[in-house]
Amino acid sequence: MVLFTAAMIIIPLVAILYGALRSDAPGAPDATWSLQNLLHVYTNERYLNSLRNTLSLSVVVAALSVCLGAAMAWIVARTNAPFRDGLALLILIPLMMSNLITTLAWIALAAPNAGFINVIWKNLTGSTLYDIYSFSGMVMVLVTDHASFAFVAFYAALRSLDRSLEEASHICGANAIRTAFKMTLPLVWPTVVTSFIMIAIMTSENFSVPTLLGSKVGFQTLPSSIFIDMTDDPSKPTRAAAAGTMLLWIAIVGTWWQRRILARSSRYVTIGGKGGRSQPLDLGKWKWAATAFLCLFLIVAVVLPYAALFFSSFLKFLTAKITLKSFTLSNYEFLFEKDTRLAATNTLLYAGVFGAVVSVVYVVLSYIVRQVSNSRGGAVVEYLMMIPSSIPAIVLAVGLMWAYVGVDLPIYGTAFILLIGYFVRYIGLGVRHGRNALSQISPDLMEAARVAGAGQTRAVRDITLPLVMPSVGALWTLLFMSLFTEISITILLYSSSSMTLPVLLWKAMAAGYQTEAFAIAIVQAGIIFALIALANWKFGILRKALQ
Amino acid sequence: MSVINITGLGKNYGMVPATRDVTFSVDEGEIVAIIGSSGCGKTTTLRMIAGLESVSFGTIAIDGKVVAEEGKPGVPTEHRNIGMVFQSYALWPHLSVFDNVAYPLNLRKVPSKEIRRRVLETLALVGLESLDQRYPNELSGGQQQRVALARCIVAEPRVLLFDEPLSNLDAKRREQMRGEIRTLIKRINGTAIYITHDQMEAMTIADRIVCMNMGHVEQIGAPADLYERPVNKFVAGFIGDCDFLNCEVDAASRNAILSNGIRVPVGHINKPDLSGPATLCLRPDRLEVIAPRADPAVLPAEIVKKIYMGPVTEYTLRIGSEEIRVRDRDHNHPLGSAGVRIHEGGAMALFDQ
């Protein structure tokens, strides 16, 4: 199983390098080895411009997300702002939502002609309030998403920070502000840098936001260029592979840098220790301002866009002049058509059934990795499992295309290539999750069962399985939410029989049927919200994310 | 007859020997404590007996049947008919107290009616009558300890194993549980091996003590044997409090001669017929501080420090260039010159091995 997994991981990586070094598409009769595509991509103004755009978008989004996330985490973890604990759980929602759906919600809210707020504003003043099809629009959508990520990282860091370090600073005569800058900030500095890098990497590989919002204003990033190379006629898979290597560089350098910082930050041994609970900082009358700040984030990031999305999904078409006649249910009727039913069935099968299967596989894999991790090969395997988390999804998709397109097996053009892609894509997440789950089960518990008279198999059945099940369930929930809205891999590898709801949504957007896309998005968002609520009730996933 | 026979038992981790040549036996209804500082191999020995570690050398026999020997897989843990209390208690968090305790009986295919009766009886025995429907995380540390104890004894296994079971309790509770555990084991006539690093715990609970150091056995015997007649400096220092002085033993007169020429009459000598350089061990609780006097049975010394400890005062006295401690109920000796009287068993002379 480990060898199979290793092969699944290595094959697309090798394939992308192979593809970048070929002169023509896979299967083309006169294709030869060539450096031409690599030279073209690394010197051509279009790709260099995409690279610049990718980097600037990533840096701006990461910087703003870190500031916003850190501020919210500080309010929740350290102050006496009212309702902070309840609001903290809501702040996690953007983390669980796919940014494909979020982008659509923002289009419904702030498209220049017919976006919800612009319609209202235009009726009042005659001008446009805000245009989502812009650099700042992309930043807005991505920051509302990634601020939640930074929030979790900072919350964990602040919580595990030993309070007595700050108390010692107070005792030495420093006031609250001085302590925050002189003690707290340096101590959480590794978190600042690592979450900055991680958000920058996630932004750099983001495909749906720049494609949906940037292409109208001619703003291309590397993922959107790769997408265009792959899908515009005539498609240029060699260029896409070459550009993929460029995107891969960003991920590799970022991951390496982050690892280096994490390794060096181990001298900050206080982080990761157990922080005691002490008196939260009293903000006085400012505590309501702090709560208002958290509420404002939730309104802007969640309430407004999703309300607009819901509202607009009942419109016949996006228009600035809304009357009673503009409303219709036909967008939802479209959901019952044959194509849509196939897509819905597929999506549920991939996210539900396949998600459940791979959840188990990931946990088993992490068990095996744990068993062998002390041997020399074990460390290699362990490292290998973490690689796919840093391969950009769209690069993985191009690699899979190159790897399996000519292979005489029913993989390319069937659901299998999607499933392989999903399996590889989430292996890092799954194995890490499984390892955490298993490390919480002390070996004593198994040994106690053996002593009580249970054989190896019986002990696994009676003790390990029941204890690991909630973690498998939580992992499955996470995978379901990711797979249910997956677009970056699917859009390049789907076929008419393996169509999914996000692809359908994407096609509706591309064809200009925006309100139909909104209806799909509402259905998807509704299911995800319901699932978050259910999983939080069953497995406490939101609370666990904050522990 | 012996229930457990351990012969020449040893364990290597890679090339590093963890324990070597451990040999002892445990009789029916006997409690044997294995004591030693951390890393001395006591837990490894217990885990080999439980079948949780393989054996590198020697054999383990239970009721005359070899369950583990060098170079063979051995009888698996689940077929050794043992019960064990883990240091962490290892209660299964997803099972109620009742189900935790019932598990060994379930595996032995006991009818469910009888399971119910025996589980409730055992819980009553450890003082947890009404808690059978609780879950482990709803119990205090002491209660969890009792559940672990109940689970260990419920199936009346042939051998009971205890791996430092009291080390996670606070001092008061620990003292109380020591007595209870011994009473309980004796009541069910259990044959037990008890691991601890606390000498008081070992002396209270065990009939015999195996003292281990750096992977091998230093001495085996009843608590009084180890305290009154240690075979070497390590045992003397580990079982009870001790200060050491360099001396020269004169076998004929059974005297230890200190470096300043003072002769000290000695009770126990580990090699009674030998003369020569040895170590004099003085037990602070069996010495007495008195006013200085010219008496050959009194050591001339100088009080350099005193610490009030409640029932006693601990005096630090200088003899020549070395220091010893004396704990005396008389709090009123002033600093300065004094004498030390040795009570019975207060001085032992030990040769290096």
Image (spheres, coloured by chain):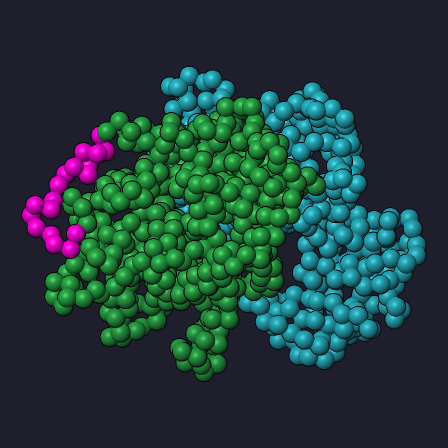
From the top left corner, tell me how far across and down residue A367 is, in percent. 55, 36
Identify the magenta region.
A319-336
Q: Is residue A33 magenta?
A: no
Image check: A147 left or right of A2? left
Residue sticking out furthest to the bottom: A173
Q: Residue at x 76, y 73 (%)?
A: B318
Q: What is the quadrant of residue A167 in the picture? A: bottom left
A198 and A490: which is toward the camera: A490
Examine the rendered structure and indicate whether residue B176 appears above or below residue B128: below
Q: What is the quadrant of residue A30 in the picture? A: top right
A375 and B120: which is toward the camera: A375
A10 and A261: which is toward the camera: A10
Colour cyan, chain: B
Q: Is residue A362 visible?
A: no
From the top left corner, tell me how far across and down residue A193 is, in percent. 51, 64
Q: What is the quadrant of residue A131 in the picture? A: bottom left
Q: Residue at x 60, y 41 (%)?
A: A23
Quadrant holding the N terminus of chain B? top right
From the top left corner, tell me how far across and down residue A543 is, in percent. 35, 50
Q: Residue at x 51, y 42 (%)?
A: A236
Image check: A382 left or right of B254? left
Q: Colour of chain A?
A: green
